[in-house]
Image (cartoon, rainbow, N blue to C red):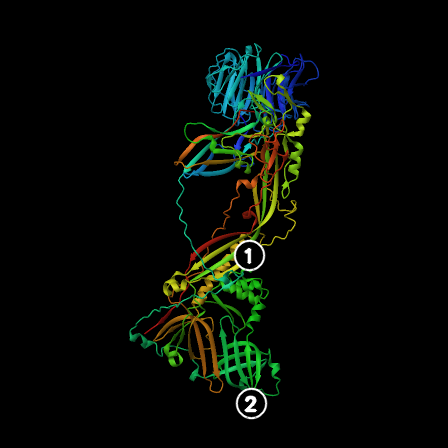
Amino acid sequence: MDFVVQSLAALNSGAAAVVHGQGGWVLCTKTDASVMGLQTSPDAASWTPYPLLGSATADRALDAAFNATGRCVVVGTQGRAFYSDDLAAWAAVTSSFATTGITGVAHGNGLYVAVGGAKCGYSANGISWAQRAALPTTSAQQIAFGDGVYVAVGTSGWLGRSTDNGVSWTTIGAGFGTSTINNVAYDPDTGVWCAVGAGGKIATSVDGGLTWTQRTSGTTQILYAVACAGGTWLVGGAGGVVLESDDLAAWTVATTALGSNTVRGIGTDGSIFVVQTDFAQVAVSASPSIAISLPVEVNVVAPPVVAVGIEVTVASASIAASLPVTVNAVVPGAIALPLSVRVNDPDIYADLDGAATWAAAPHGRWRAIVVLGDQDISDRLIGEVSVEHEDNTAALADFEFLPAGLLQPASLIQRSVRISFAWDDGSNVQMLFAGVVAWPEPDATTGAVRCTCTNRAQEIWAAMPRAAIDALVGGRYHTAVSGERDDNYEYLVERIKSVGASWAVDALLQPRILTWQGAAKTFTVREADVIDGAFEVALPDGDQLRSRVTCRLQHRYQLLRGRRVVAQYAHDFALIRPRIYATTNYPGVTALTAAMVQQACEGVTGWTRVSEIDIEHPPSGAWMIGTSETQGVYSISPRVAQDLALGFKAEYAARWQQTVTETYEITLVWSALEAQLGSGASGAPEVEGATLEAKFDSPAWSSDATVLPDVTPPALGDRSVAHQPPGADAAARDEALRTLLDRAWVGMWSRSRSGRVRFAIPCRPDIWLDARITVEARRLRAAGKVADVTHRLDVATGAATSYLGIAVGMPGEASATLPVWTLPPAPAPAYVPPISSFSFEIGEYVGGGPESAEWDEATMIGFSTNLLGPSDDALNYYPHQLSIKAPDLAAEDRDPAELTAAATIPITIPTDLLEILP
Amino acid sequence: MTTYKFFSDAGMTAELTSLPITVSTLGGSVDGVIYFGSPVAGKTLQAASAPGVDPVTVVAADADTGAGLAASTIKLALSAGGLATAVGGAPLTLGTTIASGAAIAVFWRFTTGASAAGVHTDLSLTTNMLVEG
């Protein structure tokens, strides 16, 4: 190991320790023949003495320790202690050691812990000190810290180990016998401890100081100092002994440059060693020369065989026209609707005819009770009274009466109406309708007035608070799907599209939600109950049925993008330096100047420089061009060197917006329907579409780097922030998607139950839209919710009839519930910018040489120069200039991006009882 | 022990101990960028041969010149565009004094012809002899 030995005039035989920490080096010593003090140095090259005491004493500094923030504590004889935060201004503190010499100090676990004699003291800040219990030795010498453990050493072979910051100590046998252990050190890179002492003894521990192994040093000299750096251990002691070892087993002489002067201290900064001797000497090891290597592992693999299937989707032109959009694509071809035919024994029909137990009025006679305004006009009714209720429609009523006196027909408009049916004896009143007169029609011939009435269901819903609608309806609503709906009735209509239910207003003017499955009342109708035994069956319209529906949501937002790139260039000093090597003349080139670099780096447009322009200048000095001065000397003065450049580095950033549209396409497939109807039902799927868009209203953002959000990457690369404020973020997107899916599922169900079974029965005014009826007839079995009901009463005869339509759908009688949707993950962009996107183009072009190509300004971007020497017309010369070219933004980075996520979800839909019997 | 290393990120948080490259048996080119520097403040790196005068360089080294891949399969440049004119196997000058704290982007391109499937570990990216101060 090479050492450079320095003689320090002010350093004398008081030398004791060398310590390195934040801020530099500290030699513990005397600053002259008799004053306790230090030598400090930032670089181990030049040293500055600092007296710690103002007058001559026999005292001296013995050891020092740094904490993590650079506070250095120095301890010494007579219990003296000092501290400094800058290695320049030192302050004395009271150490708690009284006049006992403090021989060692170390820092770890947030404490300074010092030893001396039988004492152990500690301090959190190096200023206020307190004593621990006495050590199990009378003469501790040194202390060190590593990996949570303090190890102290002393005379008579004592080595103590403490895991509680010096509160308690365990004496460890380290194999030194009665020999004094002078010093101990820890290598944080390997976790190895090493202790040295009298007789040239060295012991090491690899288990945190629990067990120790004696090593063979090859010397019997007293060893006082030990340190480790970069895997190399150095020990030193009497007689100028300095030994080194890389494995702690074999020790060799590191240097003999110190003569016979006793080595008292060895310090290290992890790179170099500083050795201090008794006699005004400091030896500094040379920095180790290193090469940094990165293994390259090349894996050659056979390319996979990739089969690419081509799928051509021909979409209806109207699908892409606009969004939100609902496209009803007509399924081409005929659709066959298979029916289940059951052949029953004729005996079972015997119970159907006449078996019903209807609560009919006596003799089948009814009377109507109509209250117009506050007047009962029942006695003046003529003709027919009818009341009609239907799902998702306002109820209507119609009656005709003869006014009692003069009447202004227009005054009837909006007059309240209540209609009830009762048995002809006036009992068992059943209220059927409440509402207002909408259209009075006087008959000029008879004087009668016909009134058509409505229950104003839409107005009632419109007046209902939105929260109440939400509670009553359930389901989902999203503005991206339905738009903004100011009218609460329209809001109801949109919201209920995601629920398997219908809306209505009942005879008491109460808003009602009527589920398609389950019902408040159930009835069974047999053939004998039906007037004329006639049933009319309308099957679901095949053109309306859908086995597939695609929900398409477009989530559009601005991606706020930032990119940081680098402009860097460097060339060898040899490029500009003329020299003669053997017989070859290398003339050098006209050098790059710092001004050219500044101009080029400051002239960049479209990018903002985010770093200083770091220019590397050539070294100043003089170099022989050839092997002797007679061949010339090339020199650069310090002033000129500052004007030239060997290379430079600057970083730039840009920000821009990119519109991103994420399209989610989820197709719901009702396989059971396709199995029933054949492939024709799986034609062009219906598309339910919506767009969720987040506007970014900050026009200055792109041009003003101070406008937030800041997307400048901290290092080379990209950084993006998606502008997705609440309401247009991922949660809103998922909610919109689920809304679309719910509506699609409900829509498929709704279309499948568009069939109707119609029949008429003697009046049953208690049957309303909340009833579910099962039909058991000779030729028909069906079940479904009442979709519409009309009660008609002939005032003159009292005959009354109820006309019913029940909703029936695809056969199967299977239940199903709204699925819990699993959404596809957000699509990720496939484009990854190439590395060329992150660096400027800066080449190097040297003209005036035999291989110099013709100058091309368009392609020769970078530093162009010429070889020095006389010009030759046969050669190509270049302008002496520096041009740099910023990377372009690729279209994939800049243009609107379209990302698609697709999924197919199989579903089941509730089906009904519907059988035609032979 | 030097604090200068190769990293996979410009922030010098992920040290590289190996540079894995995967190519097809059909051959082809692969481009990439790695970073060289020291995250420890206050350090400098210079060439050991003539500190402050000779450049710090990186070059592809071939530990087994008789077999495996040749160093010329790797081109190095300080910019992506520079790879087009870089010479395979030629050293890349990083500067004469490399200050710590900021990484230098080293762009590389590996080019090979058709070859048998296998793993080659004879190449490395190596600096010249350096001194850290």
Q: Nearer the viewer, residue A441 or A638?
A: A638
| Disc nearer the start of the sequence (1/2) | 2
User: Residue A302: which numbered mark, if any?
Assistant: none
Q: For numbered disc 1, what is the local secondary structure?
A: strand
* Residue B10, image quadrant: top right
Q: Which mark is residue A446?
A: 2
Task: Between residue A601 and residue B105, name the one nearer to us.
Answer: A601
Quadrant of the rendering where the C terminus of chain B is positioned: top right
The residue closer to the viewer here, A517 or A622, is: A622
Please say whether residue A235 is visible from this viewpoint: yes
Q: Chain of mark 1?
A: A
In the displayed structure image, the side of residue B10 where residue A783 appears, left or right: left
**Residue B37 location in percent, x, y?**
56, 31
Comparing labels 1 and 2, the label whose residue is closer to the camera: 1
Residue bearing the label numbered 1: A692
Whether A767 is drawn above or below A713: the answer is: below
Q: Residue furthest front?
A: A873
The chain containing the residue under callout 2 comes to A
From where the camera sits, is residue A647 visible? no
Amino acid carrying label 1: it is Leu
Q: Are marks 1 and 2 on the same chain?
A: yes
